[in-house]
Image: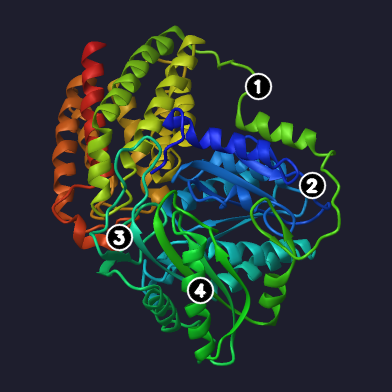
Amino acid sequence: MTRLFNDPAAFADEALEGFTAAHRRWVRPVTGGVVRATATPAGEVAVVIGGGSGHYPAFSGLVGRGLAHGAAVGNVFASPSARQIHSVATAAHAGGGVLLMYGNYAGDVLHFGQAAERLAADGVETRTFAVADDISSAGPEESAKRRGIAGDLPVFKAAAAAAEQGLPLEEVLRVAERAGARTRSFGIAFSGCTLPGADHPLFTVPEARMAVGLGIHGEPGIGEEALPTADEAARLLVETLLKELPEDVADPAGERAAVILNGLGSVKYEELFVVYRRVAALLGDAGVEIVDPEVGELVTSFDMAGISLTLTWLDDRLEELWRAPADTPAYRKGALDAAEPDLDRASVTAAAQDIAVPAAPVVPAASDASRGAADTVLAALDAVARVVDAHADELGRIDAVAGDGDHGIGMRRGSTAAHRAAADAHGLGAGAGTVLTRAADAWADKAGGTSGALWGTILRSLGTALGDRDAPDAARVAEGVTDASAAVRRLGGAEVGDKTMVDVLVPFADALAAATAEGLSLADAWDRAATTATAAAAGTADLLPRRGRARPHAERSLGTPDAGAHSLALITRAVHGALLDHH
């Protein structure tokens, strides 16, 4: 378990602070993460990677020459927010455009996609690429839905080495696509990880058993098998990966492969070496030429006891990029000439931080009526934070049935940050719209992940609808909720029936709009809609998930409601209480 921490909510920030203090030769801190401390040639494509904390050396430890130009770092097991990614990319940009790279998880896809849109609006040419190497998370026919695990490293490295060769953005992206298409990973685990402050692991494995095909966010495996010997584990990993070759590789014999045997957190290096000796022999028996193998902790999951094997099938170009030198805090290869510190980009870094955080605590002008409505908004956000805190453990338990179990933690981070930001804005005399939009940004930044992106979208849609000029009536609130429903579906791609929060948000929005159209007061209309939301959340127990981390474990979730749907229903009822108190 994770033993050394202060406030669990501050763990990721404090870890990043200590990391940058220890590695100033390679990195310097910026809002949202780190960038290289060394100068990047003007016009070079900036490869910016990122993801949640808890996976060190991914992602901050991979920043440096020969690898990433910057890393956006989210909270524990949660993607960084779009604002954080935008900040890091702005600081890393050297005039050649930006390639954003990340593991293929819904939250990362949402936040990195939003960041790309913001960078493009700034005039920065930007592309995105999601690594999807975990063969256990989807079949070959659905490879685009696979998770990104330890295959992140060879794909990141290929793109970064191509960027350092001076290739333009589109060619760097093509290199990433080629490397991603030829990378496969598979993992096993013997126990789950325990997050800072938690008193139990995210999943458990029975005595003398192992989980097969697990994720790196505490997701349980797709199956269980008897605990193997080291040689048996090696055979399972190798044989599983050799069953699925890239389309242009007919036979492994005579092929070259970059090989990574990755420790997930608490398997000792000596154990890894015992396994690798058999991995190397088996690949050799299959006729595979191993190129620059890596054995160690490269993409971890806190204290998870497990290992994964990654094969990247190389051609001449990919081998050149894999062998290219690199110098980062956690990954070094070959030799590079001495580099000059990046002394000329302080103004760029400052600009990135100004973008991410307002320079002064000012709010837009608001009418007295809107400031009065902001009192109710603040009370509602307080109610949201309190109900989430009271049910966080329950939400985590529900989420752990088929997911990674962190929904309660993420919702607590987001709702608490949102209430705090709203209170700050309210104290400065902000109107209802600004209070909500400040809360939206704070929720997205602190929660990260899919829920952070979606709740940020919900609050921002409401804030836009309410504005800072007038006292919002029931119809305007209903309009904002309807806009939020449409925005969440557009952003996340889910529809009713997918077993997500959308299964509650859509009927809630429809019921609220219908009730206000009948002339009901906001409190009465919200009451009716909240009752609809509660019933809809319960109904998700009968659905099979078609999106998100629970999808690979769909059958396990039958009989259990969706955690995001359940939390939304709880929140709608809590907000009704605030509306009654401020009626």
Mark 2 or mark 3: whose residue is earlier in sequence: 2
Q: Which residue is mark 3?
A: 551
Mark 1 or mark 4: whose residue is earlier in sequence: 4
Q: Amino acid at mark 4?
A: Tyr
In the rendered image, the quadrant that contains the C terminus is top left
Left or right: 335, with 212 as reference point: right
Q: Amino acid at mark 3?
A: Arg
Left or right: 363, with 501 as reference point: right
- State the CA–CA distance, disc 3 to disc 1: 42 Å
Left or right: 543, with 344 as reference point: left
Q: Which residue is mark 2?
A: 38
Closest to the observer, 308 or 478: 308
Q: Is residue 490 visible?
A: yes
Q: Callout 2: helix, strand or loop?
A: loop
Q: Callout 1: helix, strand or loop?
A: loop
Q: Amino acid at mark 1?
A: Ala
Q: In which image quadrant can residue 175 be found?
A: bottom right
